[in-house]
Amino acid sequence: MSTHLHQHSSFKQYFLNLFHAIYTTVKGMYITFSYVWGVKVVSIEYPEVREVLPARARMRLFNDAENCISCTQCAMACPVDCIYIASEKMPEGAEIKKTTSGSPIRLLLTQFTIDTALCCYCGLCTTVCPTECLTHSHDYEFAQYTIDAMKYDYLAPDVRAWRDRIVKA
Amino acid sequence: MQSRWDIGEPEKPTINEETEQLKSELLTLNMGPQHPATHGVLRIEIKTDSEIVAHAIPHLGYLHRCMEKHCENLDYRGVIPFFDRLDYLASMSQEHTYVMAVEKMLGTEVPRRAELIRIIVLEFQRIASHLMAFGTYALDLGAFSPFLYAFQDREEILRFFEELSGARLLYNYIWVGGVWNDLTDDQVEKMKSFLDRFEENTKTYHELVSMNQIFIQRTANVGVMSLQDCFDYGATGPVLRGAGYKWDLRKQAPYSLYSEFDFDVQVGVGEIGQVGDCWNRFIVRMREVGESIKILRQAFDKLEPGSIMGKVPKIIKLPKGEIYMKTECPRGELGVHLVSEDGGKTPYRLKVKSPCFTHTSMLPRVAPGQMIADFVATVGSIDIVLGEVDR
Amino acid sequence: MLNELASLINKNIPSAKAVASIPEDTKLDGSVTVETSSITEVAKFLRSNTEMPFNVLEVISGVDYLEFIEVNYMFAHFDVNNMRRVTLKVKVTDRVNGSVDTICRIYPAANWQERECFDMFGIKFNHHPDHRRILCPDDWEGFPLRKDYIAAKVYNTMELYPENKMNMADRDFIVRQDMIKKAQGEAATKA
């Protein structure tokens, strides 16, 4: 602006500048107006139309408690400590179930809670999981009114109901 | 030898002589922390003399998370997500610097395919970051539509990253020893076709903004950071190159596989304005995008099937010692000073040298004597990200 | 290169007592340690000499080793044909009043870097023109990056981790988590 007034040192320069300003602005306007016709709309009308997420998209975590062997590797790998696991010894005489991949479940999982308010969606916990029961689902709409509601208990009785909704096929 | 480096009083800010005679008072004006032109939560306390800036005092720390302290309690793999959050517009580059430091201490061999994928994502990240710089700079100067064009192209790059890593901004994609996921041929084809389209678009951007006379009037000869200032304050990246110095770590000290690639280092030559001004810094970024396209095309040709993960122990333990590793990030040289204890599973100390911090420290030097509108142009031209300044 | 630099410093500034330490492991970085009191002269020498100049100060990084605090100055020479880099170290043993002379009139980049070092480690830099905290608020207590730092419970009437807002069940879990980690770590070291 005023710090380079020397550019207007002569009349000729002044009018040349004026010409350039008008010319380049018209050029820019032409580019902008060329978008009025024939250019596809790129934005998505969100609530009605939803994006198809890539297969690897990392959204809310989901733990399939039936396959969990309570190894606590996910809790150790988590950089923000948002996974709470508690387990007990299997009661005497109980039959030892197996995961879908075939490894025996020797511990009784008593709590598996993830605080999604703390979670940073880095995906480190899912990579260390030996039975691949902890995965990122494709559910990204889970706003809540309170912080406590951001904690998800994956042993809750209603987990099946929303599991079908969020877990990727 | 009497040189200007002898100890003396620091330079006092100059005040306009004419207004000094009028004995006017300096007016204090707070720019930020919530200000659209500060690119985040930076507060700049400006003492103005009518419209002229007499001093500018940046106040940092509004985004300070003491990430360096956090990292001392994390294992070496867990640090990577924290590095994403430093410069959230160029997360890949930040991860890469840290990962390279750990790999060098560990002595890990990274497979060739992993290195090439890294270079592809790094250069895409550079394009995305420079597009953001281009868009927001035009926004700072009052032009709205370039921002939308820039975002449209950036969105496609973010989509590539989402397909690759699963996240749009905070990837955690570059791992110690390699990369997380493999790049498929399908994605490579998509990227190639994007590059062809994008190369056409860059020409539009030059017509729309770089060569626009109004833009030139706002930026040419404004906020000149001379080469001497750049060395004094340790400026790197587009700021140093905009001042006309050919310095790019990818060329001067090639890391990764950059020595195999054929590209130029773009510097400001001052065909408009003078070297070191806002326009030259801006044009260096815009031309670097073209160089990145060159590198990307070569990288696609070099891609060959292979492993994407080197041999890394399950629990990373580094030998006692320290290392300082720096790479060329979109905003300048990012350095990581990593100190480890013997056999420690966590870093003993992790210091991040952020280029934005250095560049912000130059603001008090260039601000005196500028008009406020020019100062906004200067702050925009150094392209700071506050996540990296405050850490 | 470090040995050459150390002998060059010793030749010109005898009081610096520069010692080069080169690690056996070639992957790691070496460094040059100088006397704390002579840092200004050494910096001036590094900037102005003709044999081995360093024109840029990249970063100042403190490291707390509990017995002493180390201040690392990373100097570099930005020259296309002849680039070099060195880590210069000084040691501060006094944890309360420890101080180093400023070099921000030789390398203006040191201005903010020294402020950050003071903010995080509490090392005072003598003759610094603007000796304030930079990232933490001015009235913050303690120096966060020291190893013995304990965060204050209350800052500006704001309570850190107020119990009525914390989920105490979480806390128990974190404690239990730590115990698990400790036990597993011990098991891993035994094995």
Image: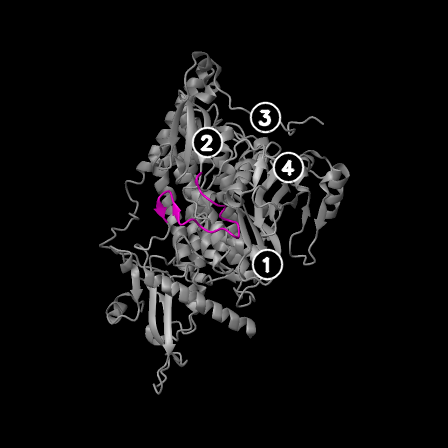
Residue C56: image location, x then y, percent:
61, 38
The label shown at residue B57 is: 2
Q: Disc 3 and disc 2: Cα gap in Å? A: 18 Å
Q: What secondary structure prevails in the magenta region?
A: loop
Chain of the residue on which disc 4 is drawn: C
Q: What's the distance in space between the residues labelled 3 and 4, CA to CA?
A: 20 Å
Proximity of marks 3 and 2: CB atoms separated by less than 8 Å: no
- Residues shaded magenta: C137-159
Is A115 above or below relative to A41? Answer: below
Residue at image mark 3 = B9
Up/down of B58 relative to B341, above or below? above
Q: Nearer the viewer, mark 3 or mark 2?
A: 3
Badge count: 4
| Neighbourhood count class around disc 2 (C-alpha, 10 Å): few under 14, some 14–19, many 20 upward | some
Residue appearing at x 38%, y 27% in the figure:
B29
Which residue appears farthest toward the right when viewing the image? C11
| Residue C140 included in the magenta stretch of the image | yes
Give the alpha-carbon distance from disc 4 to disc 2, as whole Å. 25 Å
User: Which is closer to the viewer, label 1 or label 4?
Assistant: 1
Return the residue at label 4: C55
Between A21 and C141, the one lying in front of the other is C141
**For numbered disc 2, what is the local secondary structure?**
strand
Disc 2 to disc 1, C-alpha distance: 38 Å
Residue type, mark 2 in image: Ile
In reply to whether residue A124 is colored magenta, the answer given is no
List the residue tagged with mark 1.
Answer: B341
Judging depth in this view, the residue of C149 and B310 nearest the camera is C149
Quadrant assignment, res A23: top left
Labels 1 and 3 share a subunit: yes
Residue type at the position of mark 4: Asn
Whether residues under marks 1 and 4 lie with C-beta atoms below 8 angstroms apart, the answer is no
